Image: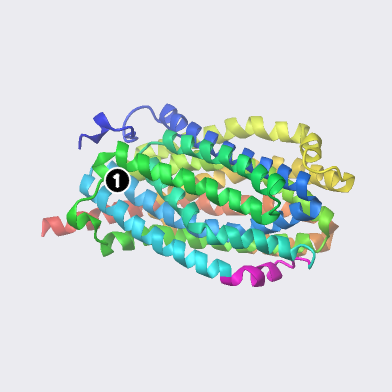
Amino acid sequence: MEINKKENITDMTRGPVFPQMARFALPVLFGMLCQRLYNFADTYIVGHFLGDEALAAVSIAGTATYMLFSIIMGVTTGVGVVVSQFYGAQKEDEIRKAFAAGGYVAAAMALVITAAGILTTRPLLGLLRTSRELLPMAAAYLLVIYAGSSATMLYNFSAAVLRALGNSFVPLLFLILSSVLNIGLDVVFIAWIPMGTAGAALATILAQLISGVLCVWYTFRMLPFLKMRGRERRPDMRLIREVLRYGIPTGLQMSIISISDMTLQAVINTYGTVMIVAYGVCMKVEGLGFQLADAIGSAVGTFTGQNIGAGDYDRVKKGVRSAYFLNALCYGIFCPAVFVFAEPIMEAFTQTPEAVGLGVEYMRIFTAFFLAGGILVVYHNILRASGDVAVTVLMGVSEVVTRIGCAFLLPWLFGYRGLWFVSPLTWTCAALVGGVRYYSGAWEKRGNAEKTAEKQPEKQ
């Protein structure tokens, strides 16, 4: 296959491992940071123009939208894994067919998410114990987000395909554009046109739609080998099943984790608006920290998928060791910085002294455990991309059991401060499950078995 010589994509099956992974992860990280900075700007604009109650409502709605993004990320991850494996195996025709199959799955799931989300918005907010004062604002935000889920799917699908082919730079450019548009539209729909929390959601959807359309345009214009011909446009049930084989467990794993997150949010909500505001701001910072892990994990996933396709398992292990080092490097800078500047960070979003104090407490606790969270993401991506998807669901179940159990037990034992240890203990326990599985070598045996099964018909 000659596409490497003429297309802006990267073959990760050869060359020095660490520099290659770092080069791939850096644009992903910058893109995620831009998105996270937009989230900070969004939080600031909502809090500044609409007040603490609107900020609390958007924080609650943000927890609820994680369920939506879990399904979207599951589908797009499934597409990315299949495309990266075919690319590593140098099967150009199969890449196009997988691209088409993934498109059909993504379109169908976007419609399901839209319908289900709109129908379950208020019951979901009720399960989160949302107060009567916050319910209308949170519902207005969620309804717009769910109605625009196709725009979210469009960008994530096209970006996942590009990253699977080793191109993490172009998704970065369109993500930066989306973030800038989002901030500008926030000002328009919140400050100039007083649409309240619904305006913040509408700004997000319109920005994602524009970036998604541009990403798809680039994909077809600059990567002509992806243009499908004749039968390649038809749904290939074999590849649809393959996309779902990776996508459903990933979506399930992320969805059940979101359930545990919502349970913790529901417990937080019982402590009142001040606690909700403090926790909401901390979630922004925690999310920023996980962008580091997600960028490294994205590199691990693409690297593993391509090298599994090429049958080079030793190179996969080198990639995992490089990911360990990248995590240690990134969190060695991030965690001390958050610990030191926790108070100014909180004061940037709220002037309520009680909320500032609560947020500083939590930030200084979770920074001590962030490396465990980063390693957890590495294990998720190596196991998923190698085809060992069942254990990633088990890791998700361990997160649910730990987070829900600790969310009720620790406050009973230690008061509200017990809540600050719920997520750190959850990351640590799930990372231990992933580590045991990775070092058992079961993922490698599974990959070898699948390769043998693929070759078997050719021998008959």
Is residue 396 rendered to the left or right of residue 441? right
Query: Is residue 106 covered in magenta?
Result: no
Confirm whether residue 64 shows in the render: no
Is residue 51 rendered to the left or right of residue 292? right
- Location of the C terminus (image quadrant): bottom left
Of 453 and 338, which appears nearest the observer? 338
Confirm whether residue 348 shows in the render: yes
Q: What residue does disc 1 label?
A: 309
The vertical placement of 188 against 169, above or below, is below
Q: Main secondary structure of the magenta part?
A: helix
Is residue 48 rendered to the left or right of residue 310? right
Residue 22 at x, y percent in the picture: 47, 30
Badge 1 marks a residue whose secondary structure is: helix
Query: Is residue 127 covered in magenta?
Result: yes
Q: Which residues are magenta?
A: 119-131
Q: Which amino acid is tagged 1? A: Gly
The residue lying furthest to the right in this view is: 353
Residue 23 at x, y percent in the picture: 45, 29
- Location of the N terminus (image quadrant): top left
Q: Residue at x 50, y 31 (%)?
A: 26
State the scheme by which the image is colored: rainbow
